[in-house]
Image (spheres, grey):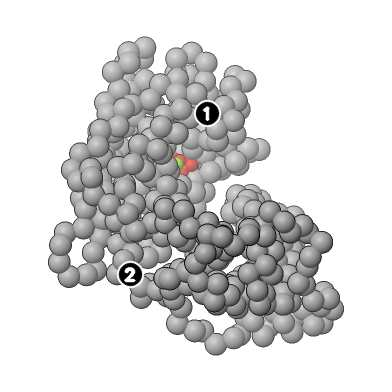
Amino acid sequence: MSGTLKNPFALLGRHYSRRAPPPSPRQATHLLARYASSPHRPLNLSALLSFGQPLTPDSVLASVAYALEEIPRRLATRVQSIESLPFIVGTNPYVASILAAHRDSFEWLATYVTPTSLEENADFAESLEDLVERHANDIPTLAKGFQESSKYMTNSQISQFLDGAIRSRISVRLIAEQHISLSRAIYDSSHPHIGVVNSRLSPADMIRMCGSFVTELCDATLGGSPVINIEGDRDATFAYVPVHLEYILTEILKNAFRATVEHHSKKNRGQNSLPPIAITLSGPPPGPSPNYFSIRIRDQGGGVSPANISQIFSYAFTTAGRGASNDDGSGGGPYAAQHVGGSAAIGDGGMGAGNLFGEITGKGLQTGLGTIAGLGYGLPMSRLYAKYFGGSLDLLSLEGWGCDVYLKLRCLEEAGDSEI
Ligand code: ADP
Ligand code: MG
């Protein structure tokens, strides 16, 4: 690796394209079928990580060849699975737009001439970043499409489709982001860690980071928030993908914060005595693999009602918002829009009319920070992330008192056999 190479990211504009002429519709169909049916190669995490160990110009070029083989193969499979949805679901504008975006990205990648120099690769990596960006809203868009077409598919058909779509999306992002990261690191040797895995990720630091974001969001939305106490192996680190841990912790904390504030504002309105969220960290014990980092997130937010417990991991199940059809019958559910501290209200729930994305609609309070609940995707997606490398996520509810979420994440130093 050389720190003296000039970074062509800064020099190259869009004028330089390695794209072959676009395929005709017939060629595109053939191409798609060829990629979708290409033999399944055993793909694992160590193959992905090996391109950065060590990082050399040759390994970057090997990485781009890998990305150009594996990403279009996955996109082709997604295109086919969207196409095999019931016809009427495919005519939904949201679903149709996702299909079109997948086709475009597939064709672009499948016809891209594999870069043979770092300069050519830098141009590709930059375009790949744009591609990842263009797909950033795919899951909420699909969610909207399925919400509109829910009467044409059973819940289990929807969840099977979404599990596949989200898993494949996690893989595509891992492969793309690994390559983008290597493509940048080759010009800048000062990176603390190369690639998508941080071998010394600190859960305590990540909790503090996600906690401060969720605190801000919860304060702005609900007018207060509990504190977080971290116990156990606070100094322990493990190898993991930081963005995955960040996603899971943010979702679990949002749920815990919201339940705490809402439960206690019902009990003693006006008092600011919210019980803390207690997070216990248990680092991997020394010994044979497989090893896991375990995290317990404990709240006193009243727990989940028995009527809802079997549904909380279903896509789009939420008790947030007025008009939610799946609540516990208590009139809007424990997360129903209500006023805490006088001004804030929560956005409509995922099952309600209009506002699937759960923007904060109440009383003009727009935080611009995102939403604390409402889509009903937090738990099912967090669990998919946890299971992706062979971990788990479980929620236990002590009715009337609170919830424990048990998160077990596979340590990735030794999870090289994980399929991606
Ligand atoms: P959302 O937060 O958008 O509603 P989630 O998938 O994150 O979607 O959660 C689904 C539902 O599970 C929530 O609406 C809520 O009813 C319930 N839930 C999740 N976590 C907790 C918790 N810690 N305490 C009480 N209820 C919870
Ligand atoms: Mg949630």
Give the CA distance from mark 2 to mark 1.
Answer: 40 Å
Whole-percent x, y for residue 83 in the image: 68, 71
Q: Nearer the viewer, residue 280 or 120?
A: 120
Is residue 399 left or right of 139 when viewed as pictured?
left
Mark 2, residue position: 415
Quarter holding residue 184: bottom right
Q: Taking 390 as reference, is 246 above or below it? A: above
Residue drawn where x is 66% and y is 38% of the image: 354
The quarter of the rendered structure image containing the C terminus is: bottom left
Residue drawn where x is 20% and y is 50% of the image: 282
Q: Residues within 10 Å of mark 2 (few under 14, many from 20)?
A: some
Query: Farthest bottom residue?
Result: 39
Quarter holding residue 75: bottom right
Q: Taking 65 as reference, is 175 above or below it? A: above
Residue 180 can be seen, yes or no: no
Residue 195 can be seen, yes or no: yes
Please state which amino acid type lies under the numbered disc 2. Answer: Ala
Tag 1 secondary structure? loop
Q: Earlier in the sequence, mark 2 or mark 1?
A: 1
Q: Residues within 10 Å of mark 1 (few under 14, many from 20)?
A: many
Q: Taking 269 as reference, is 204 above or below it? A: below
Nearer to us of marks 2 and 1 is 2
Please state which amino acid type lies under the numbered disc 1. Answer: Ile
Q: Nearer the viewer, residue 386 or 374?
A: 386
Ligand 2 image-quadrant field? top left
Tag 2 secondary structure? loop
Is residue 155 left or right of 124 when viewed as pictured?
left
Mark 1, residue position: 346
